[in-house]
Amino acid sequence: MDNKGLKVLLHASTWFAPFLVPFVLYLVVDDHEVKKLSVQAVLFQLVMSVLLFISFLLIFIIIGIPLVIIFAIMAFVVPIIGIIKAINGEAFNYPIVGSWIK
């Protein structure tokens, strides 16, 4: 069974329900690859949230500004790459957290 639509929804949910959609898909869908991507998506959102929070705290020191810019761009671009890969039927693992889930 091809789950391109679910994978696209999962990656796109980062902009409207970054924790709810992956959690629901994890509970409802039986496909192992969608479950793996759901866990990765939630972990990626958590890690990016922590990194952005730390970067905002470090803004008072000059190094925080580039980190905020880099992590904000990463949080926006990575789901787009996931959507493109899902549409093309290619495998995708989120950076940073992709290797945590087997």
Image (cartoon, rainbow, N blue to C red):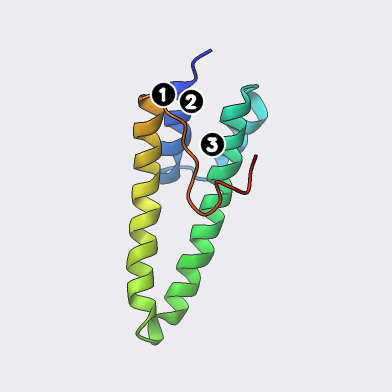
Residue 72 pos. (x, y %): 36, 60
Task: Give the secondary structure at mark 1.
Answer: loop
Residue 8 tag number: none
With respect to residue 58, does 42 lie above or below? above
Q: Name the residue under label 3.
A: 21
In the shown orientation, is residue 31 left or right of residue 84?
A: right
> Where, by quadrant of the figure, is residue 8 drawn?
top left
With respect to residue 35, does 31 lie above or below? above
> Going 67% across and 30% down the picture, which residue do you hit?
27
Task: Give the secondary structure at mark 2.
Answer: helix
In the shown orientation, is residue 72 left or right of residue 22?
A: left
Mark closer to the chain start, 2 or 1: 2
In the shown orientation, is residue 66 left or right of residue 36?
A: left
How many angstroms separate mark 2 from mark 1 (CA)? 12 Å
Report the residue that reaches farthest toward the bottom.
Answer: 61
Q: Which amino acid does label 2 sit on?
A: Leu
Q: Mark 1 points at which residue?
A: 89
Q: Name the residue under label 2.
A: 6
Residue 29 pos. (x, y %): 62, 23
User: Total label count?
Assistant: 3
Task: Give the secondary structure at mark 3.
Answer: helix
In the shown orientation, is residue 45 left or right of residue 70?
A: right
> Going 56% across and 29% down the picture, which residue do you hit?
34
> Going 49% across and 20% down the picture, which residue do you hit?
3
Q: What residue type is labelled 3?
A: Val
Quadrant in which the N terminus is drawn: top right
